[in-house]
Amino acid sequence: MNEKGMTVIVKTVTRYISGLIFLFGLYILLFGHLTPGGGFAGGVIMAGCFILITLSFGKEEIEKFLKHKKVTFLESLGALIFLIMSFLPVIFGKDYFLNIIHQKFGSIYFKFLSSGNIIIYNIGIAIKVMAGIFFVFFILSITRVVVFKGDYKIVKRK
Amino acid sequence: MIEVITSLFLIFMILGALIALESRDLFSSIISIGVVGFILSALFLFLKAPDIAIVQIVIEILTLVILIRATISRDVCFYEDTREFFPFAVNIIFLLLFSIIFISVLKYMPEFGEISSKVREFYLKEGFKKTGAANIVTSVILDFRGYDTLGEATVLFTSILGAVTLLRRRAKNE
């Protein structure tokens, strides 16, 4: 039994529950154009899943599959998806931010693929928000505030 | 009925914010901030805005976790501050001044629940047909008001970049 992280109870519960939390975030994200929710809320819930794993297993466990470079890559990728999809109509000579996919394959309503560009915007925003919020948590949790000669300092956590 | 519930919630939120400001213990003030956020999300549910309620409750949970785990780490827990007379008097004077101005402006505000924008009817009528999204909020923020969302995404990206850069460099120098 390794000493990192929290107790066995928390670890077991996290093992069962983290996948379900990730799935719920995915649902909120992918059905954002039909039910309440959207890219931002879904991304934050998925980031919450990773934060739960970090809290209960320690930061070594999450670094095995979500390294710094990967997180920064994901954040930039999300922003780029959003930007490229918003510029796509300009290439075909239409207005900026026009919903061209819906205009081309229109007349489907209340279906999963009904809203054209909106689902792709949602996916981009969710990737960006997930990576960004997880990265901020990670950076904040490896640094700590200490009192040093009367004023506050930020140092790396041992 | 809805006015009574809304004002009750608002009073509780103001109380929570005051406790968060005035308590000496940082931990209890963070808990009070959490109370404010959860009451706000319940208020959004009562005002029939489930999209914002979901975002608010999720962000509130994450903020509490981040504030408790990452910023309070058994080191800086108590907050010492002595209140002097002159800044306190200036605060009170400005508070009175701004409340007089605010109350005199308040009668020009629209009534609670009154429709004040004309563009809203266009969104409700045409939003579903033009974008195909059954959720009108999503169709507005990602299609009609796409520029705003782009700006929001830029702000989030830049702020996260700034936070990460600042904290990382300090930690490396130590």
Image (cartoon, coloured by chain):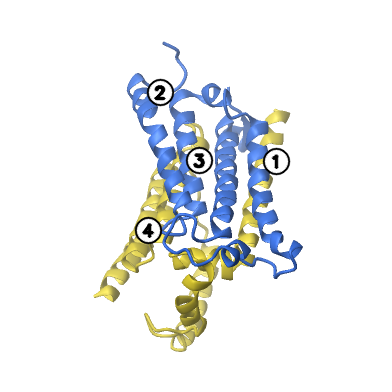
Chain colours: A blue, B yellow
Q: Position of residue B60 (x, y in %)?
A: 43, 50
The residue closer to the viewer here, B90 or B24, is: B24
Q: Chain of mark 1?
A: B
Whether residue B15 is situated above or below residue A63 in the rendered picture: below
The residue pinned by badge 4 equals B41
The residue closer to the viewer here, B24 or A121, is: A121
Residue type at tag 2: Met
Which quarter shows the C terminus of chain B? top right
The residue pinned by badge 3 equals A47
Give the numbered dot on residue B88: none
* Residue occupying the point 37% across, 21% down: A7
Q: Disc 4 vs disc 1: Cβ atoms closer than 8 Å? A: no
**Which mark lies nearer to you, 3 or 2?**
3
Q: Secondary structure at mark 2?
A: loop
Alpha carbons under labels 2 and 4: distance apart: 30 Å
Q: Position of residue A41 (x, y in %)?
A: 47, 51
Q: Quadrant of residue A116?
A: bottom right
The residue pinned by badge 1 equals B165
Give the numbered dot on residue A6: 2
Q: Position of residue A146 (x, y in %)?
A: 57, 32
Q: Are marks 1 and 3 on the same chain?
A: no
Q: Are marks 2 and 4 on the same chain?
A: no
Alpha carbons under labels 2 and 1: distance apart: 29 Å
Residue type at tag 4: Ser
* Residue occupying the point 43% across, 88% down: B107
Tag 2: Cα neighbours inside 10 Å, few (<14), some, or many (≥20)? few
Alpha carbons under labels 4 and 3: distance apart: 20 Å
